[in-house]
Image: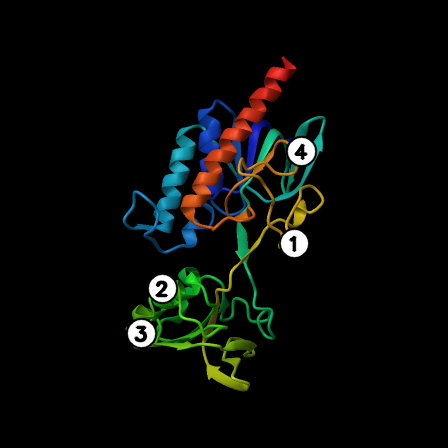
Amino acid sequence: MGKNYDIVIIGGGPAGISAGIYASRAGRSVLIIEKYAPGGQLSLIGQIENYAGFKSINGYELAVKFEEHAKSLGIEFCIDEVVDITKSRGDFLIKTLQTKICAKSVVLALGCHSRPLNIEGEEQLKGKGVSYCALCDGNFFKNKTVAVVGSGDSAFSDAIYLSSLCKQVYVLTKNNLKLHNYSEDELDDKTNVQILKGAISKKILGKDYVQKLTFEKDGIMTNIDVDGVFVAIGRVPDTKFLKDFIELTDGGYIKSNDQMETSQAGVFVCGDVREGSIRQIATAVGDGAIAGTNASKYVLKKISHVK
């Protein structure tokens, strides 16, 4: 059995670390469990220009600042994966791949993972030209031809980044609407970027590595020669292990009220995994502040009741 804590936070991104900071400053003992590294997926983001206080900052640099702030308050980090949570005698037993930990309260800051296209060839060619992180893998495609599949901000951010590395970048969007948030002029200025509106990806071809992408547009099937396919069609919440423990939406997001309280007393939620979140760093930090504060109040009431 591992140690006991007042509050265990599952997820070490901006939401989880923010929750930890507020809980720790309120005098609670805090452990943050993160699958990858402190800062979560911040380290996978390039330049951030919409987080107050920083005109522009690299995602990895911001992740380090979050981690340093948390550790300066005595918050502990554990690199592990949670596989189950149960409630026993008013406390929570958290089972990870490596140990078991007891907590008086839990904050869920699980985040999300990349949504797959679910088309032929995608699974077989993962890591062989199919990628879900342009920042992580873009350098492997210098002076090559790639396709970015997606219609949102992340897809066009990926396209802009890849245009500085690749010989040719195709952007396949599923609709014919005007792009939002990213200016079409900004992409139009990139002579090596071609936007294919209304193009539905159907198949990724290749034996040992990606060679072609098949898409349908206006009822016509077309193959384009590509060395890589970057998928940017949204994210899926990491909540499968919670389905019998807490109330989720049909899409797997965690339901909560404006106090970040979930259907399970003593369990709070914050960040991307919460229903209704707009999934920005600023909102994740705000959610975390509320969740950490209210988890601390819950623990304090619990301690006072025992006394």
Q: CA distance from mark 2 to mark 4?
A: 45 Å
Label 4 near label 2: C-beta < 8 Å? no
Task: Give the residue displayed 34% in from the left and 50% down from the top.
Answer: 50
Label 2 near label 1: C-beta < 8 Å? no
Residue 17, numbered circle: none
Q: Which numbered disc, 4 or 3, marks the residue closer to the eye? A: 3
Q: Kindly identify the amino acid type of the residue bearing the numbered disc 2.
A: Tyr
Q: CA distance from mark 1 to mark 2?
A: 30 Å
Q: Which residue does the numbered mark 3 point to in the structure image?
A: 188
How packed mark 2 is, by other alpha carbons closer than 10 Å (few <14, some 14-19, many 20 or more), is: some
Expressed as whole percent of the image width and height from the top left, the position of residue 133 reads 46, 61
Q: CA distance from mark 1 to mark 3?
A: 38 Å
On screen, residue 241 versus residue 274, left or right, reads right
Mark 1 falls on what kind of element?
Answer: loop
Q: Which residue does the numbered mark 2 point to in the structure image?
A: 182
Mark 2 falls on what kind of element?
Answer: loop
Q: Earlier in the sequence, mark 2 or mark 3?
A: 2
